[in-house]
Image: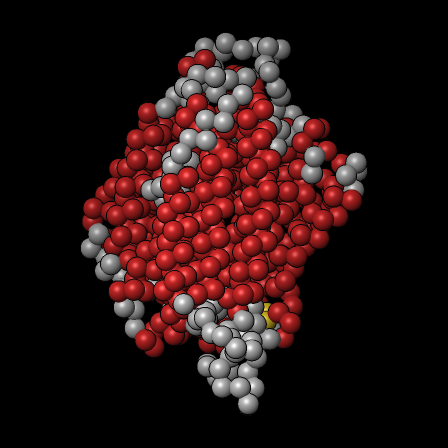
């Protein structure tokens, strides 16, 4: 029992509710949201240190012991993601001060922002399958409103598609939950894992595993990603950066959790399918990223390639693959937020998303240009930036598992990323300067701080991975040995 | 009883799928709504259907009804209600703004 665990979930929720009452005090809302996200990051670091000393921490809400109560479980993997989430949300909220506009701020933008963070943190920390569904819905409802807030034509149109596909995938999530409940008679993730390993994973359970892969795959942008490029390029930059960094990653987290804790008995079926889907995702995402000359579209297709690459490491299901996946997941969250924010600034400056209509921004905005360059090198995985270590371990993991094709496709996808981001860099920053500073549609005033923070983070993670290495190794140990998670949840109680 | 409900769920799912495959926004929303009703029924069946069993364990009663699926359905209904309400408002706004409720005309163009 550790009461600290409730804060990352409940603190944004309380603040978000408070903002509804403080509708006209926008300055106060800004200050409180920054403080809340900072405090959540601090608490998360405290919990991480407790985990590395005392093992996985749990909180059985209301004192009902597992498996009867609904509990929060903080293992190292989820806390690393909660920490990254808070840092990215911190940067995005600072970015939104200047760019989001008075109208959206007055229409509960910060409330919705924090509700989204509540849902994301809750999904990472819950230890109950149905509770995972509830937190998914919390974050999805907040995201529906955030995509449509502003009510322009494109936003409304894309929100319709986004909502419909997500309602459908949530419906299938419930179908999966119903099947799991009828077979195992429990919803606690650790308890499901125990029951399945006792009874064996037969064909029916494997089918349910594939159903869950479908559900989370839709949310993660894995293979069934056709809704993603449209709805991620419709909202304003601060929102689309947050979505690119967080929302697909929640789906990826759910896949990793289910496939390492619950459905790990038949990897030659389920994990092979995951690998095939990851490979197809990388190929199709790569083709999309290369084909378009619209900056938003290129960046959203890069989100899809990232999702495929992270899951390639899990599909390999070796220690190195999992290590690479976690490193790459953290890196991907940071660098996607970074590159989306810079992409948004480019669009603000030039007033267009078409690459062919922009040129030579580096003369007036050298810092922006070089930070984009660093971000894109990190995205490709050039040492010493943060993408390198993840890519090495994922590739090594796939080779160890014998999935050579998967590793090769991952590397080819890197080349496609290289081509697509260099296209942005050369078109937007190189060449003749067509816009003088007076002609620009926006300014970079006040938006450089979060971008610089994220750039510093990606460099720091690349140069000094030792800082988080011990945490990541603990996380991998927990993922590869489900028994550690189960023991922590039941805490020595008899498992019924 | 379970077989009968299973058939009902199947019918709800097929009608829902048919409606989702149409072009009109309102039909799609109704289809999604029907599918979620089908799923609610399904969760109930998965807990096992019994007559006369109280949802409590005691020494005198031999049979008892599983109360968890009902709690799950309650939560699912509330969430589904909120999402459907949002979806209806959204579709109305989209219809007003675009002047059409045909999803085929909401594909989006390359240049806008």
Q: Does A451 appear above or below A430? A: below
Seen at 53% across and 69% down, the residue is B68
Q: Does A118 appear above or below A368? A: below
Residue A306, picture quadrant: top left
Q: Does B101 appear above or below A127? A: above
Seen at 72% across and 49% down, the residue is A17
Looking at the picture, how far across and down is residue A474, in whole percent? 44, 64
Q: Looking at the figure, which quarter contains the N terminus of chain A?
A: bottom right
Seen at 40% across and 34% down, the residue is B22
Residue A367, picture quadrant: top right
Residue B111 shown left or right of residue A235 in the figure: left
Tell which of A272 and A334 is nearer to you. A272
Looking at the picture, how far across and down is residue B86, in whole percent? 59, 40
Seen at 45% across and 55% down, the residue is B39
Looking at the picture, how far across and down is residue A289, in whole percent? 35, 30
- Residue A309 seen anywhere in this rendered image of the structure: yes
């Amino acid at each position: 029992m550790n009461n600290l665990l409730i804060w990352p979930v409940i603190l944004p929720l309380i603040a978000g509710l408070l903002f509804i009452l403080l509708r006209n005090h926008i300055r106060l809302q800004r200050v409180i949201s920054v403080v809340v996200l900072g405090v959540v990051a601090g608490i998360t670091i405290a919990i991480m240190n407790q985990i590395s000393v005392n093992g996985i921490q749990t909180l059985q809400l209301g004192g009902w012991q597992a498996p009867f109560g609904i509990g929060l479980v903080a293992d190292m993997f989820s806390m690393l993601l909660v920490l990254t989430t808070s840092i990215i949300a911190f940067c995005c909220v600072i970015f939104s001060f200047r760019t989001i506009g008075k109208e959206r701020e007055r229409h509960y933008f910060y409330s919705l922002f924090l509700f989204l963070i509540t849902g994301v943190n809750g999904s990472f920390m819950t230890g109950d399958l149905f509770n995972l569904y509830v937190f998914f819905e919390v974050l999805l409802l907040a995201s529906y409103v955030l995509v449509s807030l502003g009510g322009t034509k494109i936003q409304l149109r894309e929100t319709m598609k986004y909502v419909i596909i997500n309602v459908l995938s949530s419906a299938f999530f419930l179908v999966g939950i119903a099947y799991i409940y009828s077979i195992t008679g429990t919803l606690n993730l650790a308890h499901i894992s125990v029951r399945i390993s006792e009874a064996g994973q037969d064909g029916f359970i494997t089918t349910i595993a594939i159903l869950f892969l479908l559900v989370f795959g839709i949310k993660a942008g894995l293979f069934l990603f056709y809704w993603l490029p449209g709805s991620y390029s419709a909202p304003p930059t601060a929102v689309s950066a947050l979505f690119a960094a967080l929302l697909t990653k929640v789906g990826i987290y759910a896949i990793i959790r289910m496939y390492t804790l619950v459905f790990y008995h038949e990897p030659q079926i389920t994990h092979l399918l995951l690998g095939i889907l990851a490979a197809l995702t990388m190929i199709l995402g790569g083709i999309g990223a290369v084909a378009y000359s619209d900056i938003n579209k290129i960046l959203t297709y890069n989100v899809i390639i990232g999702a495929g690459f992270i899951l390639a490491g899990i599909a390999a299901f070796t220690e190195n693959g999992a290590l690479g996946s976690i490193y790459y997941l953290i890196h991907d969250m940071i660098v996607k937020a970074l590159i989306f924010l810079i992409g948004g600034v480019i669009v603000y400056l030039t007033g267009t998303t078409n690459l062919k209509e922009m040129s030579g921004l580096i003369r007036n905005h050298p810092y922006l240009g070089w930070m984009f360059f660093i971000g894109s090198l990190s995205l490709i995985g050039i040492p010493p930036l943060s993408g390198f270590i993840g890519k090495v371990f994922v590739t090594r993991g796939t080779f160890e598992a014998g999935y050579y094709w998967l590793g090769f496709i991952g590397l080819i996808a890197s080349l496609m990323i290289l081509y697509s981001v260099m296209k942005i860099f050369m078109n937007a920053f190189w060449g003749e300067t067509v816009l003088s500073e007076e002609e620009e549609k926006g300014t970079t005033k006040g938006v450089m701080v979060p971008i610089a923070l994220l750039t510093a983070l990606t460099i720091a993670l690349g140069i000094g991975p030792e800082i988080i290495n011990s945490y990541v190794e603990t996380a991998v140990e927990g993922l590869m040995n489900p028994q550690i998670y189960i023991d922590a949840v039941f805490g020595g109680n008899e498992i019924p | 009883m379970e077989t009968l409900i299973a058939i009902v769920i199947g019918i709800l799912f097929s009608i829902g799928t048919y409606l989702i495959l149409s072009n009109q926004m309102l039909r799609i929303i109704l289809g999604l709504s029907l599918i979620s009703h089908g799923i609610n029924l399904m969760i109930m069946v998965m807990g096992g259907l019994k007559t006369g069993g109280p949802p409590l364990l005691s020494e005198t009663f031999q049979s008892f009804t599983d109360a968890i699926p009902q709690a799950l359905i309650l939560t699912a209904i509330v969430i589904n209600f909120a999402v459907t309400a949002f979806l209806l408002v959204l579709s109305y706004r989209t219809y007003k703004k675009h002047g059409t409720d045909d999803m085929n005309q909401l594909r989006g163009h390359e240049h806008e």
